[in-house]
Image (cartoon, grey):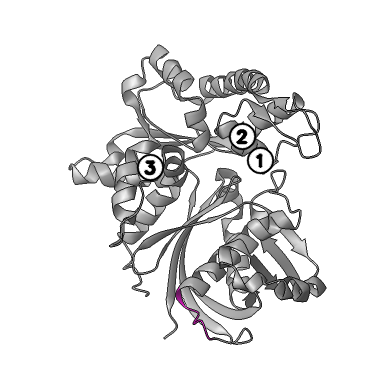
Amino acid sequence: MPPLIQTYIDMGSSATKCLYWQGQPRLLHLDPQVARLNPTRLDRLRLGGLTTQEPEDSAYVMVGHSAYAIGTLAMAQKGDSGLALPKRDRAVYKILATLGVIAEKTLATQDAAPSASGEFTAQLGLLLPLEEYWQDRQDLKAQVLGAMADFRFRGRAWAGQLERLEMQPEGAGLYLAKGLQLARAGVSIRDSTVVVLMLGHRNLSILTFEKGSTPQETNSTSQGPGFVEYLKQCATELPGVAPDDPALLAAVLQAHPTFHVPGRREALDLSKACAYAREFYLERVTQFLVEWLPSAEVEVIVGGGAAYVIRAELEQFFDQRGMGQQVTWAEALRQEMTDVLRGPEGTDTPDLITSVRWADVYGLFKTFMYSAKPAQTH
């Protein structure tokens, strides 16, 4: 019987975040960039020692005659994060890359020939943008099924069979985790109306679960402003800087006062640019919340790394509307995530933003585990 891969994937615009089993739950991070590769260049890449690196640092897949670099390798190949594209357009390549990395880490032997083929079965959990969840999940399932059956990862052929696929809209993982927490206290989440706010890189989503019902187009949307709007506004104040430059995002999140552009001697004033961008982004976020938050009494769960950039202002917003006591932040899962992910050798506690960015996929993983026995891979 082929070995089993279990993985839970959030194909976020700032990173592909994944949990998988290797004797215990483990994290996997891939940068969001994708680049089309000329297959004739792959031999040169391999000669440069590509396949001796960690698989997540040199990930590329071949589907048919097409080759794509994902993550760190795609960045080196001048790939982009595809912010202007629906996530479904690149989802298959990111899923295959994730499976390929896990297969190499858990299934492939060190002495296996590159030409040797491997087989596996897979149980997948995927988080999709809300509109894409509504419209595209059946098409995506068919694409994943077909591509998994015959693909190459870093030159090695793999044949995967999909045993189970669970798709949920982004934000649902936080709702599901909250439901499990309440159930342990003997309380049903279906007794309440719960609103999940996901302040993500690409967009801001609101998912309304009325008494346990799934989000509907009348009460839920993912058309709110993403953190990319902050970065776009920031870039307008920084000549020659692109809003999707990973270095800009890193500098903003680390609150650097200046930003250095390669080839320029003088540093740009990042703190001033961020002040304008923050004001712009906050205004758009609050306008969205005023328009979409239900007027009835609800429980609110706030997630997404961008929420923590403007947390103080969001807390003030909720307090002014008398909702402060009804809000739960995604960091409530931080200690639980740390305990679950800590193996026999121990692990560092994830920093706040890291744990928040992983909380949604962790909720999906946690719920999945209640209905599927984890694979004991070694």
Is the residue 88 above or below the residue 64 in the image? above
Q: Is residue 87 left or right of residue 25?
A: right
Query: What element does badge 1 sit on?
Result: helix
In this view of the protein, which residue sits in the foreground, 93 or 77?
A: 77
Q: Is residue 109 magenta?
A: yes
Q: Is residue 267 visible?
A: yes
Q: Is residue 80 magenta?
A: no
The disc, 1 or 3, on the residue closer to the chain's N-terminal end is: 3
* Disc sitting over residue 133 in the figure: none
* Disc sitting over residue 251 in the figure: 2
CB under 8 Å between discs 1 and 2 = yes
> In the rendering, at what x and y percent does residue 15 appear?
57, 49
> In the rendering, at what x and y percent does residue 152 appear?
64, 76
What residue sits 59% from the left and 77% below the top?
Answer: 149
Q: Name the residue tied to disc 1.
A: 247
Alpha carbon distance from label 2 to label 3: 31 Å
Q: Quadrant of residue 275?
A: top right
Q: Name the residue tied to disc 3.
A: 175
Crowding at label 1, few (<14), some or many (≥20) Cα neighbours within 10 Å?
A: some
Q: Is residue 372 left or right of residue 258?
A: left
Q: Is residue 164 visible?
A: no
Query: What element does badge 3 sit on?
Result: helix
* Residue type indicated by callout 3: Tyr
In this view of the protein, which residue sits in the foreground, 4 or 34?
A: 34
> Which residues fall within the magenta stretch?
106-111
